[in-house]
Amino acid sequence: MPDVYYRPNTMEIRSNMRGRILAVDDQPDELELVDSILRDEGFVTETAGDGIEALQKLQRYRPDLIVVDASMPRMNGFTFCETLRRNPATATIPVIMLTGLRSHFDRLNAFAHGANVYLTKPFAVEELVAKVNELLQLSQSL
């Protein structure tokens, strides 16, 4: 039996949910994969196709953690992280940057813009889940 379910027309979530996660990626297949993995782990998820859409969703959806790609149109993951960190209402939300960019410069750039964790694609499902759990535990203990 899944840890999370929705009641028809009420969108009520069972009280034992593991956390709310916003996944952001412009590649539908990648976004669907990350979303599916996180839902299978019992997380409540919301998705966005780029940084601008993600910022709009943050106005009504308060996630406990964000998984974001670096390379996206309109607003990339670096700018998204920087914008997130500048807003006091969202500054403390943990961010995992999950990207195909592999250079040392890109990794440092992600941290400089506010990412907490940097994972590269292709990624190990177990590593993504471990990092999500780790960041959620850290943020809940603060």
Image: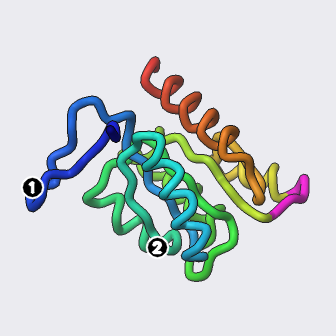
As drawn, 126 above or below 140:
below
Q: Earlier in the sequence, mark 1 or mark 2?
A: 1
**Residue topped by disc 2:** 52
Residue 91 drawn at (x, y percent): 47, 44
Name which residue lies at 81% across and 52% down: 107
Magenta residue span: 101-105
SS for dot 2: helix
Name which residue lies at 25% across and 59% down: 60
Residue 123 drawn at (x, y percent): 74, 52
Is 49 a magenta residue? no
10 relative position to 122: left or right: left
Residue type highlighted by circle 2: Ile
Residue 10 numbered mark, or none? 1
SS for dot 1: loop
Q: Residue furthest right?
A: 104
Q: Tell which of 40 and 135 is nearer to you.
A: 40
- Nearer mark to the viewer, of 1 and 2: 1
